[in-house]
Amino acid sequence: MLGLPLADIIVLVLYFVIIALIGLITSRRVATQKDYYVGGRRFGKLLVMMQTFGVGTSNTHPILVAGAVYTFGMAGIWYSWLYMLFMPAVWVLQPLTRRLRIYTTPDYFELRYSSGLGTFFSISAIINLCIMTGTMLIGMGQIVEGITGGGLSKEIVIPITAFVVILYSTVGGMLAAAVTDVLQGILIVILSFMLLPSMFSAVGGLNGLHAALPVEKFLLAMPRTGDPTKTIGFFAIFMLFVNGIFGNLVEPTAQTMQAAKNEWTLRIGGTIGAFFKRICTIGWALVGLCAIVIWPNLSNPELCFGMASRQFLPTGFSGLMIAGMLAAGMSTISALQVIAAAIFSRNLYAKHINKTATDKHYLFVARMMGATLMVLGIAVAFLFSSVRDAVEFWWKVTAFLGPTLILGLFVRRGNSWGAWACIVVSVIVWQLTVRYLVPIDVKWSTVWYQSALYLPAGILAYFIVSFLTPPEDEKKLARFYARLNTPVGQEHILINAGLELHPEEILPHDPEEKSNGKR
Amino acid sequence: MTNTGYSKPETKPTLKMFTPYKETIGGFFIVLAGVVLLIVIVQLLMWL
């Protein structure tokens, strides 16, 4: 039935029951917008860790990494390790966004630059969240199709999954997303490595792999030979890293950082969660490497993870793998749903449509937006030909906006005119590259070559225009940098200085909590 | 407990944005070492 044995179907049904229960239980703790958007800012290290792992590890990653390694060799691992090189910098920078005491990423742009830029970011973030949701849905469809051998097609899987996410996530909010992250985190860690023993035995271990594949397939950085669009060398890794620096904090998913109860919790939980992901990535990469030997002529490399799950997992575990993949996708999608809901309700609806509604009304609007995002995500799911196309598109979009966020943290003279110039110039340079350079040399079609042009151009535009136009309002800047200089837990300093802060941000006066929650 | 030792907030970008310094700098190098170690281990495993 459905390409699966009965044991697998029972596991799947059990999974859906558990997910529904999580939504129901967590919904009891969601009474306000703050509860819904950022889990009441109560998340401890475990929830932050699993959420970082969960939001960063969607079901698309095993497919993406295994598929990329199938195409590029081990260097394909950088499709997921992209942000790893940036992790030490994340350790330093991450608490800054928590210090801003904001809910959403567009809040940053309103606080630092202007309402117009916040609105622009809100709209583009919602579009990007739709793309990300669509990407997750494609991934789910592909992997279930692969595992069931086509018994369950993506045309069936995508709408069903979307419907279940709407059911549990619209009631449970960020907390429901985080709790399912814990569940999926455990499943993914176990399942990522369960495939390997039988796959290794099929290819004759590492010795068998070395005998069957050329040496460059084992290099993390491939030499610059052959087709530049299929070679990830040092230059590509470096540029992906630079893209990561600018793209990381600006991603709307950075909202999940706001759920941590303090900076130390965010740092520890976030770093361990991110490391977990990198370790799991190794398992997915090895699946891709073995797949080259087992199925040497796959027309769609992204199917190899699903095919491996079908062929090399024992009965009962295929159902668990589908559950794991669905959990991975659904927990990420539910987080995206909450983020889009928060952005729409706070940064668009409450600012431009209805400024005087009650907290309950905004919560209702947010929940409706979450459900709408899913419907838009389904539409997007069928627009992209593959997961990799969608991910590469996403990298570029975030990189256009990223410099304005990072520079705004450190360049006081930077203003909203400079920020607009940065975005506009980046998009123009990107389009010129696509139109005029790609026909001359195909290497310009890669995200790493394109970003080598649009990033410096955008940053230069930011500085030139910022210094040629009037600075931002002094009071606004004072408020922004005062928050950055004041650790979470020391809100009384901001209040004493007469800087506005929403009353709900004031934490109970606990001397033990005053310095980043470290005891 | 770490005391950041100031009572009036700075209103421009300062190094105080990175308080507490010990945790920020120490953690940076520990995470960096972890990243490098992971890359080296994976590459060595691939060459075995």
Image (cartoon, rainbow, N blue to C red):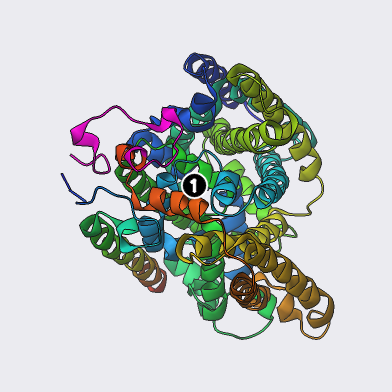
Left or right: A360 with respect to A516? right
Q: Chain of mark 1?
A: A
Q: Which region shows up in magenta? A: A495-519
The N terminus of chain A sits in image quarter: top right
Task: Look at the image and say whether residue A512 sits in the magenta stretch.
Answer: yes
Vertical position of residue A225 compared to residue A122: above or below: below
Seen as rendered, the residue at the extreme left is B1
Q: Main secondary structure of the magenta part?
A: loop
Q: Position of residue A517 (x, y in %)?
A: 26, 39
Residue found at x 36% / y 37%: A495
Residue found at x 31% / y 63%: B15
Total marks in image: 1
Residue receiving disc 1: A195
Numbered disc 1: secondary structure: loop
Question: Which of the pair B21/A172 is nearer the observer?
Answer: B21
Vertical position of residue A79 compared to residue A186: above or below: below
Residue found at x 66% / y 70%: A447
Question: Which of the pair A509/B2 is nearer the observer?
Answer: A509
Q: Residues within 10 Å of mark 1 (few under 14, many from 20)?
A: many
Vertical position of residue A310 compared to residue A434: above or below: above
Left or right: A307 with respect to B44? right
Q: Amino acid at mark 1?
A: Leu
The C terminus of chain A sits in image quarter: top left
Q: Is residue A288 visible?
A: yes
Quarter of the view holding residue A246: bottom right
Task: Look at the image and say whether residue A107 sits in the magenta stretch.
Answer: no
Question: Which of the pair A231/A371 is nearer the observer?
Answer: A371
